[in-house]
Image (cartoon, rainbow, N blue to C red):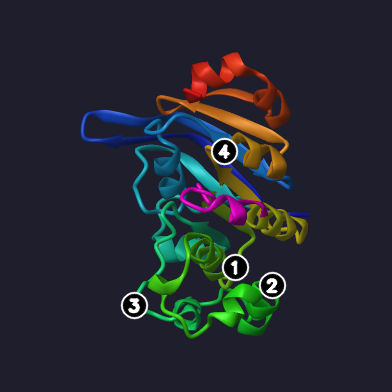
């Protein structure tokens, strides 16, 4: 059984602007995709869950335990791993050093040995600086760094953004394999083909609200919905 992430009626305001307005979702067992146009609040939701921005109302729970109001490192210690948009790796550190800066959550985390086995490409480049990696390799490093915390639940924000097409299928396969190990996943993804390959269910966000829950396969086949909600 995977982890259970529950978000209930959260709101986030920046000044007078309501960025998230009563957002609720349940991510249990199976991966869940979150899609929507740029600027509708998807990344803000990820940051709110991780404690990187404060919420004005609502609750966030992991396995029935409140995590809202906690600092990011406390949220991570509870078992939520974060792969942020833009990857945010340390370019001046080597691959191995990027992984060693993470504090593992549990007694049996993803050790470096396990990381090298799962990410042989990173193993080959363990002494390379972050700036010497391709976009796809940097994304693999960001995912590996999140796994080092031994998470129950992963939040991935646009993992295929800026990644060469040759790497996208590798990332999809990698993410699907991770989900099969029992780690939960909330996936923010603009590429509907990727979202459908990983998650059976999608939530559509418009102007800080969840307006639709639908199978990703249905959304992939619905051109009108894509134009209306995603601007495709």
**Nearest to viewer (mark 2 / mark 1):** 2
Q: Residues within 10 Å of mark 4 (few under 14, many from 20)?
A: some
Q: Residues within 10 Å of mark 2 (few under 14, many from 20)?
A: some
**Nearest to viewer (mark 1 / mark 3):** 3
- What's the distance in space between the residues labelled 4 and 2, CA to CA? 24 Å
**Residue with the mark numbered 2:** 118
Q: Which residues are magenta?
A: 157-169
Mark toward the start of the polypeptide (1 vs 3): 3
**Residue with the mark numbered 1:** 147
- What's the distance in space between the residues labelled 2 and 1, CA to CA? 11 Å
Q: Residues within 10 Å of mark 1 (few under 14, many from 20)?
A: many
Identify the element where label 3 is drawn.
Answer: loop
**Residue with the mark numbered 3:** 92
152 and 173: which is toward the camera: 173
Identify the element where label 1 is drawn.
Answer: helix
Query: In x, y percent, where is residue 47?
Result: 41, 49
**Nearest to viewer (mark 4 / mark 1):** 4
Identify the element where label 4 is drawn.
Answer: loop
**Residue with the mark numbered 4:** 191
On the rendered image, what quadrant is the N terminus found in?
A: bottom right
Marks 2 & 1, CB-CB < 8 Å contact: yes
Query: In x, y percent, where is residue 176?
Result: 72, 53
Residue drawn 63% across the image and 56% down it? 171
- What's the distance in space between the residues labelled 4 and 3, CA to CA? 30 Å
Q: Is residue 99 left or right of residue 193?
A: left
Marks 4 & 3, CB-CB < 8 Å contact: no
Question: Does 142 sit above or below residue 194?
Answer: below
Identify the element where label 2 is drawn.
Answer: helix
């Amino acid at each position: 059984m995977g982890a259970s992430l529950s978000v209930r009626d959260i709101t986030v305001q920046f000044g007078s602007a309501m960025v998230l307005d009563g957002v609720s979702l349940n991510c249990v067992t199976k991966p869940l995709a979150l899609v929507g146009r740029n600027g509708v609040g998807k990344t803000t939701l990820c940051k709110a869950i991780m404690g990187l921005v404060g919420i004005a109302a609502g609750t966030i729970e992991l396995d029935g335990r409140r995590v809202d109001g906690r600092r990011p490192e406390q949220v991570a210690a509870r078992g939520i791993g974060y792969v942020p948009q833009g990857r945010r790796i340390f370019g001046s550190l080597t691959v191995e050093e990027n992984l060693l800066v993470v504090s593992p959550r549990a007694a049996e985390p993803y050790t470096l040995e396990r990381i090298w086995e799962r990410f042989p490409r990173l193993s080959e480049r363990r002494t390379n600086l972050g700036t010497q990696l391709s976009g796809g390799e940097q994304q693999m490093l960001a995912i590996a760094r999140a796994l080092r915390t031994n998470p129950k639940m992963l939040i991935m924000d646009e993992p295929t953004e800026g990644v060469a097409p040759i790497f996208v299928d590798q990332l999809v396969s990698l993410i699907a394999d991770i989900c099969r190990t029992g780690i939960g996943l909330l996936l923010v993804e603009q590429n509907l083909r990727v979202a459908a390959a990983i998650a059976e269910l999608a939530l559509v966000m418009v102007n800080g609200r969840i307006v639709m829950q639908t199978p990703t396969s249905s959304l992939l086949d619905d051109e009108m919905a894509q134009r209306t909600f995603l601007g495709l």
